[in-house]
Image (spheres, grey):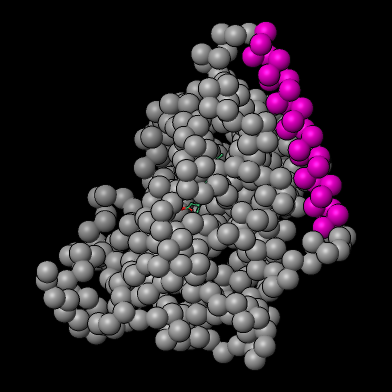
Amino acid sequence: MKKDRFIFGINLNSKNNIYYNQPKAMVIDKQNTSIKKLPSPKGHLILGHLPKFQTSNKHQVLEEWVEECGELFRINFVGKELLVSANAVINNEILKSRPDKFRRLSKMNEILIEMGVDGVFNAEGKSWKRHRKPVTEALNAQKIKGFHYVLINKTRGLLQKLEKYSENSTIIDIRKEAMCFTIDITTAIAFGHDINAIQDRENEFQKHLEIIFPMINERITAPVPLWRFMKRKKDKKLLRAIGSIESIVHDFIKRTKRKLEETPSLKKEPTNFLEALLVLGEETGFSDKEIYGNIFTMLLAGEDTTSNTISWIIYYLSQNPKVVSKIREEAIEVYGEDKISETVEQLAKMTYTNAVIQETIRLKPTTPQLYLESNEDVVIENLMIPKGTKIITQTKVPQTQEKYFTNAAKFIPERWLKSECPIYRNHSPEVIKAFGGGARFCPGKYLAINEMLILVSAICKNFNITLSVDPKEVTEQFEFTMYPDNLKIKLEKV
Ligand code: HEM
């Protein structure tokens, strides 16, 4: 076997170092290094790093610690130790080694099971494989193509609303509007029901869903599960929200079961995810609880992630009128006089709009970190990770590092165009983990990209965008997904 050679801590024989733009390992030592030997940022004597972490921008706290300690360090929450990795090679290896060597943080499963959710996001091992198959199938390109009419209708609906806002020079909370757009699409695909949040922003279902992510975020790093001993106001609110969603979804399960009995032909070609799961349930024994768990997961996973990414795209567009013009030119080239794009094939031609989406996802991934845990003792790039180690993989950090992207801090959509790529010396798409990695890679990526392409193209085709606040007032906030707080815009009809 070839002996490892190191220069400045870089393993020259690592397969990751073949190309200049491949992620380079930050190898610690020739010998296996234990987590105990890693640096740790300054923390409280008893509470450790918890006080600093209990904020609404914990991803930025983690980024400050990377500045202080480097790409690999340890933190502790009241004595409970966690490994934090902002190293692209190690993160990639961890994500790739699932479901066998690594899993999601076990606490994530505990919290979701407590909320009555038993679905693909929190399932592990064999159970995960069983859940993953129908979810991947429901979200594959062919199925999503069949739902394209939903994307068209919802884009049209939101555009009409935005036209009214522009006529009245209304300041728009675009994040809320984008949320309504994504929730309408996700519910239509999940259980074939149009809740029409775009026209009814006070929609109860939406309000209930909005409560859940911040609470998962809070509970995942809570040192003591207080909610198990006493129900605070917010715990009661969460219980009510979950109860309502549960009863709505179970009602849909009953109705859909009846529909399948009355129209057996549907079993051959289910028209939404719920129908598909129920048909599959007959063959594989999915219980109603598991079916509910996966519907709930899809609603939760498909809403904030996509709407917050749309919001970040608008944040950049509102400060880059030239980029808006280029998207508009592309829209005219692809779908001429029409207000919005009407086909999936047209979306595939929008290379510049897609480049804007990729660049936004690079700079502002809505999932800047993932919480994981090792299932066994593992050695990665000389780092010993014992079984049961809790890990935070900071996937956002490499995406904004100069060694992987030239002018990394700048918003330059052109770097994603094949024709222009060579002018940027460092360009490492493989370090982008905004949709996760390995076998648990986000199955909703294709749907999300299509939602973003159709809506962003339509907004730019029909409006000029201006930011109504100072860009410095728009801040990154993290509530399980990262969003632009205080993003307010105005639209002017072209
Ligand atoms: C811009 C939009 C989106 C982003 C940034 C995003 C990001 C992610 C990330 C980071 C993960 C974890 C992956 C991992 O552990 O490796 C994930 C998982 C998942 N996402 Fe998405 N997602 C988006 C949209 C969607 C949509 C639209 C849906 C479905 C309607 C969806 C459904 C799921 C599901 C079901 C999982 C769990 C997969 C598993 O554990 O096997 N996502 N997503």
Q: Position of residue 171 (x, y in %)?
A: 72, 52
**Considering only vertical position in the picture, is 124 above or below 374?**
above
222 left or right of 335 in image? right
Can you give x and y, in whole percent of width and height, for residue 476 in the image?
61, 66
Q: Which residues are magenta?
A: 235-262
- Where does the C terminus fall, quadrant-wise? top right
Q: Is residue 241 magenta?
A: yes
**Residue 337 in sight from this viewpoint:** no
Name the foreground residue: 376 vs 472.
Answer: 376
Residue at point 69%, 73% (across, down): 223
Query: Seen from this angle, which residue lies furthest left?
Result: 2
So how many labels did they put on this image? 0
101 horizontally vs 78: left or right: left
Q: Quadrant of the N terminus?
A: bottom left
Tell me which residue sits at (70%, 69%) in the image: 222
The image quadrant that residue 432 belongs to is bottom left
Q: Main secondary structure of the magenta part?
A: helix
Let me know if residue 459 is in the magenta part. no
Of residue 260 and residue 130, the one placed in the foreground of this image is 130
Horizontal side of residue 227 vs 405, given as left or right: right
